[in-house]
Every structure is written in C-alpha cells, then in structure tokens.
C-alpha cells in the first residue's frame, strides 16, 4: 500500500489560515500557530461586538434626541420644566405615538420642524 503524505493538504490549510490574517502585524500574519490564535480571538470579539453595536447605536440616538430637545427649547406642560429625553419617551407612550428612537433621532437631526411637531403632539 502506498503511503499518503499530507504536504498538499497542510500547505493549503496553512495558506487559508494566513489568508484570513492578512493585514495583521508581526508573527500573527506569518506564523500558522499565532495566526490561528489571532483568528480565534478576532472571531470572539466580532461576535460580542455585533451585539454591542446595537447598544452603541441606541445610546447615540438617545443623545441626538436629547440634543434635539435642547435646541427646540421645549417645556413640559405637566411639570413646567425643560423637556428631557425620558419625559419625551413617557409622553409619546401615553399619547400612543409609536415612533422608534432611530426615527426620532433622524427627525431631530435632519428635520427639526417635524421633530417639534412630534414633541407638540406628545405634550
């Protein structure tokens, strides 16, 4: 029986691993073992950060909505205080206005007059 040598398969595997680490620095881009380690870590971070991205955007939208409220200079009718983000969201829920935070942030940034009308409806 002829002996099977694994050279071709090993080289292909190594080439594929090193192709995944293109752009990495030092041994992580040239040495198979370090490259595999780097790929595993990169995969873990990518998985976790895909979930973190959703929270990051929600925080950004909250900041933009609050900034839109500050520039609009709105006052809450119930408390006679400047309208804050949390009061706005509460008022929107009470008024049964179903606009998500992403759209509110977009209105606050791009179309302040429409945003002001939404705030007036909620108040």
Image: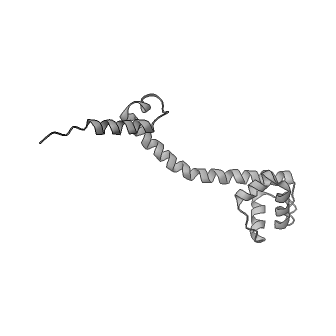
Where's residue 56, x and y in %?
63, 50
Front residue of 122/20: it is 20
Where's residue 17, x and y in %?
39, 38
Q: Is residue 79 above or below residue 108?
A: below
In the shown orientation, is residue 63 left or right of residue 16?
Answer: right
Front residue of 73/19: it is 19
Front residue of 115/85: it is 115
Specify the quadrant of the image occupied by residue 14: top left
Specify the quadrant of the image occupied by residue 27: top left
Outermost residue on the top side: it is 26
In the shown orientation, is residue 45 left or right of residue 82?
Answer: left
Outermost residue on the front side: it is 2
Instruction: Name the residue located 60 percent from the left edge and 50 percent from the top edge.
Output: 53
Where's residue 80, x and y in %?
88, 62
Instruction: Name the residue located 38 percent from the left edge and 31 percent from the top edge.
Output: 31
Front residue of 89/21: it is 21
Q: Is residue 42 above or below residue 79?
A: above
């Amino acid at each position: 029986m002829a002996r099977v040598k694994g050279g071709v398969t090993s080289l292909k595997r190594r080439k594929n691993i090193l192709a995944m680490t293109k752009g990495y620095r030092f041994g992580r881009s040239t040495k198979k073992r370090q490259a595999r380690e780097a790929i595993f870590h990169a995969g873990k971070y990518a998985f976790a950060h895909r979930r973190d991205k959703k929270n990051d955007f929600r925080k950004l939208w909250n900041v933009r909505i609050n900034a839109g409220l500050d520039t609009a200079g709105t006052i809450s009718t119930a408390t006679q205080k400047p309208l804050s983000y949390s009061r706005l969201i509460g008022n929107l829920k009470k008024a049964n206005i179903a606009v998500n935070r992403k759209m509110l942030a977009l209105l606050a940034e791009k179309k302040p007059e429409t945003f002001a009308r939404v705030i007036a409806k909620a108040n």
